[in-house]
Image (cartoon, coloured by chain):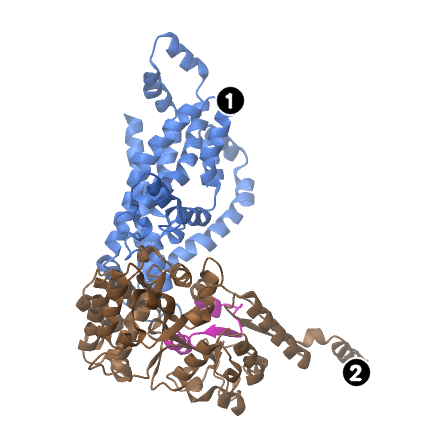
Chain colours: A blue, B brown
């Protein structure tokens, strides 16, 4: 994901170069570079997707040939499943919190830490560290933090005289608790994207603004943020798709519980599709998720396009 | 010239027996290092006696094993022999044709060694025998004698459901957590529902419901099981934060002497020690096993037990060498080694005789004297219905679902998979 981010970040300047490259030697280059990627993509992305879509029309437990055609029954089962609504709601909460809390926080830190300096580098590394941690490891660490008997949270509660709930066993608190971990884990990543953007702003522009007596906040509002628009576009896109696909933090933290109250769409798929060996049902969920992602991607492009025109 | 080449090749083949070895892959889920070592040593003995067979013992962690097995069995990398809890999952594997019937290959001696219960546990509805039973386990109500004395609860008074509830209330009044439960993992909660069903519906009622007959799991006895469960949950008998507690957490809590009872399989005897803070857990003289309370009017037999009957299955490509290995592995002589170190209660005839651990001995007697040894419901009913049973059990423990709704959810899942 990080490498993807940097490559996209360079996209603005690489675009023109790429076009020239293709014009000059397009055929040999295509023949040389396209097949490996195309084959891998087809084998590991397109075919499984087609498979999953096929399963979704059958009743299949994963064993033997697929014979039991049931039409759209799996889709109906998914949509009427008592926990599907919760899963969708949770995924949407993650999207909203990512956009409303995580990105502004990342932006705030980025603006504060875009300068150069030793202590700034230390802070930047500190904020970026959670992102480098494996998701499962991060989930387990926070599991200890939240543990109602021996965890850090009840210890803090004791110190200030508040009786802390067992957050991961509480249907209400489990969601805020997970949101905190998500924000902690990923804001550093977005911060880095923003910092890269901020550092590419020519210092003359800022200096000129300062000389003209533009206030600090106005510089941020009218110069810095508009000038790193492409970085924000990428961040928002990652935040949304990442939120829709959230899985590996949830499993060690709450495993979707208590009472299936903290499932995201993907953990819902894993729990009810894979573990319960209802692969047709799982296929239907994945198709629904896929369609949702495509709609988001297309809508996002459209909105951006409109903003661009304005 | 040709003949010479042939002779040379045969000579070469004889000189390199390694190439002629049959490899037997036995996929297991044993994670305790000493137990793995024992398994390795048994395999080494076998290979020394059978130089033409090479036994490999790949390992998968419990949850990973469940998630990967379906794909693994249909791949070129399928193990020859693998662990199984029997029940619904086994029947689905058998029906899908990924297993090898072994009734004609397995020696009569090996069949006799696991008894009729062992044979029938690994015989699918199609009448073929696909595996070999290895061990039995039972879910029992472990209790801490010290805490019972402290709260002034007489264990004998807990024999009936009303007495049991009264005892739980006494613990509450004394400020002691009555029962530890790992409700995050759900299956520990499903033991409570299962035990109540064993008492209320009995063997015939359960089996009829599993076949979807009559009202199925929405029938009177099953709704009642939920109601009794809720009576208990209303007393808030569990430890604080039980919905966030895994099996390991609950086991450790009980082992640390912070809860009076724990409804768990016989394996908790070791796990409770391992999960406790000091790794010693409750000493043997302070630990006891309570019979699960009886319920007036219940259709179950008082001797009925709930637990497992585990073993191994043969995948469709398993060689005769794989069967030979399991015959050796499951022999009384080798299984006695497991019994001696109390890893599990072996099913092989006479192997359990060497058990000295009083709890394991008692559990062994419970199972052999049982009218019905009910298999773990979440295994017996298959992954889908079993998953729903686990779900509703956690809900009932949390007092967040009505008994009627719980019963209907299971019935729905059964109807769905019939």
Residue at image position (39%, 26%) is A228
Which of the chains bears the disc numbered 1? A
With respect to residue A16, does B329 lie above or below? below
Residue at image position (23%, 69%) is B166
Reading the image, the residue beneath label 2 is B3
Would you identify the image quadrant in which residue A68 lies?
Answer: bottom left
Residue B1: percent from left, percent from top: 82, 80
Reading the image, the residue beneath label 1 is A117
Which range is magenta? B69-97
Q: Nearer the viewer, residue A238 or A93?
A: A93
With respect to residue B94, does B286 lie above or below? above
Would you identify the image quadrant in which residue A99 lies?
Answer: top left
Which of the chains bears the disc numbered 2? B
Q: Is residue A191 magenta?
A: no
Q: Is residue B92 magenta?
A: yes
Residue B357: percent from left, percent from top: 49, 77
Would you identify the image quadrant in which residue A155 lies?
Answer: top left
Q: Nearer the viewer, mark 2 or mark 1?
A: 1
């Amino acid at each position: 994901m990080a490498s993807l981010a940097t490559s996209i970040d360079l996209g603005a300047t690489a675009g023109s170069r790429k076009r020239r490259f293709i014009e000059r030697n397009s055929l040999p280059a295509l023949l040389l570079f396209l097949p490996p990627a195309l084959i891998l993509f087809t084998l590991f992305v397109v075919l499984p997707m087609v498979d999953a879509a096929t399963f979704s029309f059958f009743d299949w437990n994963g064993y033997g040939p697929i014979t039991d055609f049931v039409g759209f029954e799996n889709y109906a089962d998914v949509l009427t499943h008592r926990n599907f609504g919760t899963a969708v709601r949770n995924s949407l909460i993650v999207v909203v919190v990512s956009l409303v809390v995580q990105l502004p926080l990342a932006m705030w830190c980025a603006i504060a830490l875009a300068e150069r300096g030793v202590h700034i580098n230390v802070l930047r590394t500190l904020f970026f560290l959670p992102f480098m941690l494996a998701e499962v490891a991060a989930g387990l660490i926070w599991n200890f933090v939240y543990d109602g008997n021996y965890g850090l949270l009840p210890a803090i509660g004791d110190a200030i005289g508040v009786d802390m709930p067992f957050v991961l066993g509480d249907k209400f608190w489990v969601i805020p608790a997970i949101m905190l971990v998500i924000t902690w884990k990923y804001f550093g990543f977005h911060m880095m994207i923003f910092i890269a953007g901020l550092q590419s702003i020519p210092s003359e522009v800022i200096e000129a603004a300062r000389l003209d007596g533009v206030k600090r906040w106005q510089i941020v509002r009218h110069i810095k943020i508009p000038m790193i628009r492409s970085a924000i576009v990428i961040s928002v896109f990652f935040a949304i798709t990442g939120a829709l696909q959230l899985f590996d933090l949830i499993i060690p933290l709450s495993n979707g519980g208590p009472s299936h109250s903290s499932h995201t769409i993907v953990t819902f798929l894993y729990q009810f599709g894979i573990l319960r060996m209802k692969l047709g049902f799982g296929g239907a969920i994945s198709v629904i998720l896929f369609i949702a992602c495509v709609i988001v991607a297309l809508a996002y492009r459209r909105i951006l396009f409109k903003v661009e025109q304005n | 010239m040709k003949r010479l080449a042939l002779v040379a090749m045969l000579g070469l083949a004889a000189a390199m027996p390694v190439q002629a070895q049959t490899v037997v892959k036995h996929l297991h889920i044993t994670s305790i290092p000493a137990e793995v070592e024992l398994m390795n040593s048994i395999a080494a003995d076998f290979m020394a006696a059978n130089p033409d067979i090479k036994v490999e013992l790949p390992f998968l962690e419990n949850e990973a094993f469940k998630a990967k097995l379906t794909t693994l069995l249909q791949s070129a990398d399928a193990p020859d022999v693998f662990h199984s809890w029997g029940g619904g999952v086994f029947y689905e594997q058998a029906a899908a044709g990924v297993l090898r019937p072994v009734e004609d290959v397995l020696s009569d001696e090996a069949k006799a060694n696991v008894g009729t219960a062992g044979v029938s546990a690994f015989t699918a509805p199609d009448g073929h025998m696909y595996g070999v039973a290895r061990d039995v386990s039972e879910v029992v109500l472990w209790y801490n004698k010290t805490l019972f004395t402290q709260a002034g609860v007489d264990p004998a008074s807990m024999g009936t459901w009303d007495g049991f509830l009264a005892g739980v209330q006494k613990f509450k009044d004394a400020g002691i957590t009555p029962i530890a439960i790992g409700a995050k993992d759900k299956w520990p909660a499903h033991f409570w529902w299962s035990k109540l069903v064993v008492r209320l519906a009995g063997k015939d009622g359960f089996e009829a419901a599993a076949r979807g007959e009559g009202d199925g799991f929405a029938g009177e006895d099953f709704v009642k099981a939920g109601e009794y469960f809720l009576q208990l949950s209303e007393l808030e008998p569990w430890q604080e934060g039980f919905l966030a507690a895994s099996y390991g957490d609950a086991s450790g809590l009980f082992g640390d002497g912070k809860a009076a009872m724990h409804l768990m399989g016989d394996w908790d005897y070791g796990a409770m020690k391992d999960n406790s803070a000091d790794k010693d857990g409750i000493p043997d003289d302070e630990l006891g096993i309570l019979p699960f309370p009886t319920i007036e009017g219940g259709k179950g037999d008082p001797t009925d037990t709930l637990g497992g009957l585990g073993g191994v299955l043969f995948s469709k490509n398993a060689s005769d060498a794989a069967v030979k290995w399991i015959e050796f592995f499951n022999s009384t002589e080798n299984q006695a080694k497991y019994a001696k170190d109390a890893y599990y209660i072996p099913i092989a005839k006479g192997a359990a005789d060497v058990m000295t651990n009083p709890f394991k001995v008692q559990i062994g007697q419970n199972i052999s004297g049982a009218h019905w040894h009910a298999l773990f419901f979440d295994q017996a009913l298959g992954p889908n219905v079993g998953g729903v049973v686990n779900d509703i059990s956690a809900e009932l423990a949390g007092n967040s679902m009505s008994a009627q709704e719980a019963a209907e959810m299971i019935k729905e899942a059964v109807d769905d998979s019939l």
